[in-house]
Amino acid sequence: MRSTESDKLGFAIVGLGKFATEQIMPNFKACQHARLAALVSGSPDKARKLAAQYDLPETSVYSYDNFDSIKDNPDVDIVYIILPNSLHAEFTIRAAEAGKHVLCEKPMATSVEDCEKMIAACQQADRKLMIAYRAHFEPFNLDAIERIRKGELGTIKAITSDHGRPVKPTEDEADVWRVVKKLAGGGSLMDIGIYALNAARYLSGEEPVEVTAQEFSDKSDPRFAEVEDNIHFTLRFPSGVLASCTSSYSYSEVKRGRVFGDKAWLDLDPLSDYKKHTMKIGDDEGKQEPEIEEGNQFAAELDHMAECVLHNKTPKTPGEEGLKDVRYIMAIYEAAKTGKAVKV
């Protein structure tokens, strides 16, 4: 076990927004194989302050302009990209060309073409590429998947998942880029609807064959001048399972999922929060709430990426996983625009 700090693999964090500074960086202390090694930011003062806070030397601070010089820093093994969606491809490719492995936030990119370029760049450089689907490392979700696969719910008939939160670009700096299509690539579907989409896939254990969708946005609301607010989409799976999903930037916060089987149903509410998850299971005899220990999904995700590099393993959520979701997202947008079912 790599127990000392010097033995752990070094991560460079690209983008120092709220998620990076409040969720990712503090959780390196819980990692067994990963440590914080460098910071990349467009705000020099902020980066220097954070570097001092985490006892990083000033030489470990980079700007977006001089990012490519990170190739000369042997202390950085992996680059974690936490930037607006439209920048994921550029910095993934630059990181790979600098000889670094890449962990990239979801959605992987804003187009299928960019996803393919990211995969190709990492393959050409012989670097690992993993997409940061943290729910794949969250204990309640993992327990739910295991119960479903073991048949505790019987034959799965349907799945529902709803993800929404009010976006507030005038109040929260972290939301400013989310309503700019050039940066975000889309609205609620790209940002939080992807949790519902990905959950439907891993809970069912299948890939959808058809999608339908409807979208509604109040264009008089300046938040939705460029990106969508509400979108409702349905995924049809080969077994006949239907997943009904929603995402929204205007209704109160919700991050839930439910699986309906012919023996029982399973509810995760929240399904994709940072903590305080719950699971309920119901059948003809009543409801139960299994005791599951809350885990550190962030540390588990970081450690998994490090272990994949250390042991030359394929990540649980590789670039191909991110590409699939972006393909489905584009099909959902097409279905919403045309009003017709789209085969995928």
Image (tube, rainbow, N blue to C red):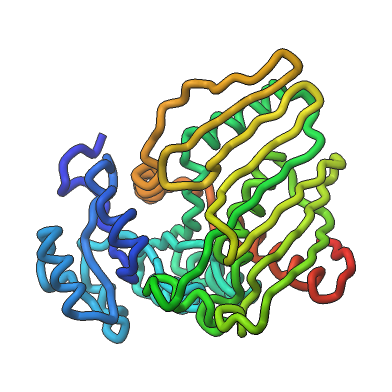
Residue at far top of view = 285
Outermost residue toward the right? 340
Q: Is residue 176 above or below residue 76?
A: below
The answer to which of 110 and 320 lies nearer the viewer is 110
The count of marks equals: 0
Q: Is 295 displayed left or right of 228 in the figure?
A: left
Residue at the (13%, 63%) spot, across then down: 56
Residue at 64%, 51% (x, y): give it: 162
Q: Nearer the viewer, residue 303 or 134?
A: 134
Which corner quadrant of the image does residue 223 belong to? bottom right
Residue 141 percent location from the top left of the image:
55, 37
- Across and down, in percent, residue 19 comes to 36, 61
Q: Is residue 35 left or right of residue 301?
A: left
Can residue 311 be spotted in the picture? no
Q: Quadrant of residue 216?
A: bottom right
Residue 312 versus residue 232: which sits nearer the camera? Answer: 232
Residue at 42 percent of width and 75 percent of height: 91
Residue 77 in view here: yes
Q: Position of residue 32 (x, y in %)?
A: 27, 40
Residue at image coords 59%, 27%: 280
Choose between 84 and 310: the one closer to the eye. 84
